[in-house]
């Protein structure tokens, strides 16, 4: 599937009708910024991080999730597919040809077991805001708010800017959780309505960064410096992935870079395997089949190394 460019976003002259592809809205979130928050997950991302725990966030258009464990092999879905994308495989199993499937959703309507589900929905600003506003009392009592995450929320910038603007009008704190890979001109407009930036630091070496995520980090590091210089509140976050970016050299280099930005703190996001089931549901291969979560001792050691760069370190 192709990524939709910002100019192709569904919009009309009425900004209320701007729409974005959203794959989840999580209420009562406590790990995406201060206080209790509602996190809006945008579909579409320029990066392809090997450890991505939301593979459905990578492509901007809707996709089909297939839950094999729920499928009773009744085969009702097969004849209804307008694209002949579903067929019978070995042992009566159900195979979906992902090249032919355009996530039209027809098969989901006939499946009696909800084994087929579409992820990704086009939503208006008003629809998303409505969900966010439901927890306004919790935000007020906890100094929380809303967080735009993904994927890369900045890949649907017109919608995001309008959503942030409307949140601000409603007294709701806005946080942007970003990969940093967004053109500065675009990011600058979004930042006008952003109260806090959560900025991921993945690898300091551009070549290694490209191997791990598909793109080098030149734009990302440049944006990090510009945001820091602008004085916008920013939290640096470091997804720590075994064998990918946890060498002593990289840990120290990331710490020093963040310290030089003038930040006092960094959050470690330790590797976990919670997203592996999603790869199966999308018929995708999990890129890190042998990676194992860290032990407490290993995390303590990494924390100590990062702290030696002068930062306060939190483990999420
Ligand atoms: S979502 Fe549509 S195209 Fe895809 S398998 Fe189902 S019916 Fe076919
Ligand atoms: S309709 Fe649902 S339960 Fe039946 S074969 Fe298709 S996916 Fe499986």
Image (cartoon, helix red, strand yellow):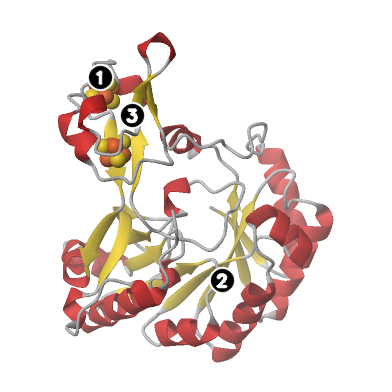
* Label 2–label 3 contact, CB within 8 A: no
Mark 1, residue position = 75
Residue 181 circle label: 2
In the picture, measured across the screen, residue 94 lies left or right of residue 267, that is left
Which picture quadrant has residue 238?
bottom right
The residue closer to the viewer here, 254 or 24, is: 24
Q: Residues within 10 Å of mark 1 (few under 14, many from 20)?
A: some
Task: Report whether the residue tagged 1 is closer than 8 Å to ligand 2.
Answer: yes
Where residue 153 appears, as percent x and y from the top left, is: 41, 67
Q: CA distance from mark 1 to mark 3?
A: 9 Å
Compared to 133, does 287 lie above or below?
above
In the picture, measured across the screen, residue 315 lies left or right of residue 108, that is right
For marks 2 and 3 on the same chain, the one whose residue lies earlier in the sequence: 3
Q: Residues within 10 Å of mark 2 (few under 14, many from 20)?
A: many
Residue 117: tell me if it is visible.
Answer: no
The structure residue drawn at horizontal position 23% and vertical position 34%, both measured from the top left corner, is 107
Where residue 240 appears, as percent x and y from the top left, is: 65, 51
């Amino acid at each position: 599937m192709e990524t939709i460019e910002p100019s192709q976003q569904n919009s009309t002259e009425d900004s209320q009708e701007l729409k974005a592809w959203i794959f989840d809205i999580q209420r009562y979130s406590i790990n995406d910024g201060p206080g209790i928050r509602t996190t809006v997950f945008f579909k579409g991302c320029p990066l392809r991080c090997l450890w991505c725990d939301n593979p459905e966030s990578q492509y901007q258009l809707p996709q089909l999730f297939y839950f094999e464990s729920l499928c009773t092999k009744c085969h009702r879905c097969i004849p209804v597919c307008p694209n002949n994308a579903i067929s019978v495989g070995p042992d009566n199993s159900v195979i979906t040809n992902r090249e032919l499937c355009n996530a039209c959703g027809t098969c989901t309507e006939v499946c009696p077991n909800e084994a087929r589900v579409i992820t990704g929905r086009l939503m208006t600003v008003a629809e998303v805001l409505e969900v966010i506003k439901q927890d306004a009392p919790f935000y007020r009592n906890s100094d929380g708010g809303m967080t735009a995450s993904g994927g890369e929320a900045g890949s649907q910038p017109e919608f995001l800017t309008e959503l942030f603007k409307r949140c601000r009008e409603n007294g709701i704190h806005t946080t942007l959780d970003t990969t940093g890979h967004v053109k500065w001109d675009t990011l600058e407009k979004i930042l006008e309505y952003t109260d806090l930036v959560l900025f991921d630091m993945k690898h300091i070496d551009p070549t290694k960064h490209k191997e791990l995520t598909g793109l080098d980090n030149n734009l990302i590091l440049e944006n990090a410096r510009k945001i820091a210089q602008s004085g916008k509140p920013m939290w640096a976050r470091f997804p720590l992935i075994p064998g990918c970016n946890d060498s002593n050299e990289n840990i120290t280099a990331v710490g020093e870079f963040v310290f030089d930005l003038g930040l006092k703190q960094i959050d470690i996001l330790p590797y976990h395997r919670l997203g592996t089931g999603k790869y199966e549901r999308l018929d995708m291969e999990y890129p890190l089949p042998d990676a194992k979560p860290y032990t407490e001792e290993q995390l303590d050691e990494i924390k100590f190394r990062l702290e030696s760069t002068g930062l306060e370190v939190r483990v999420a």
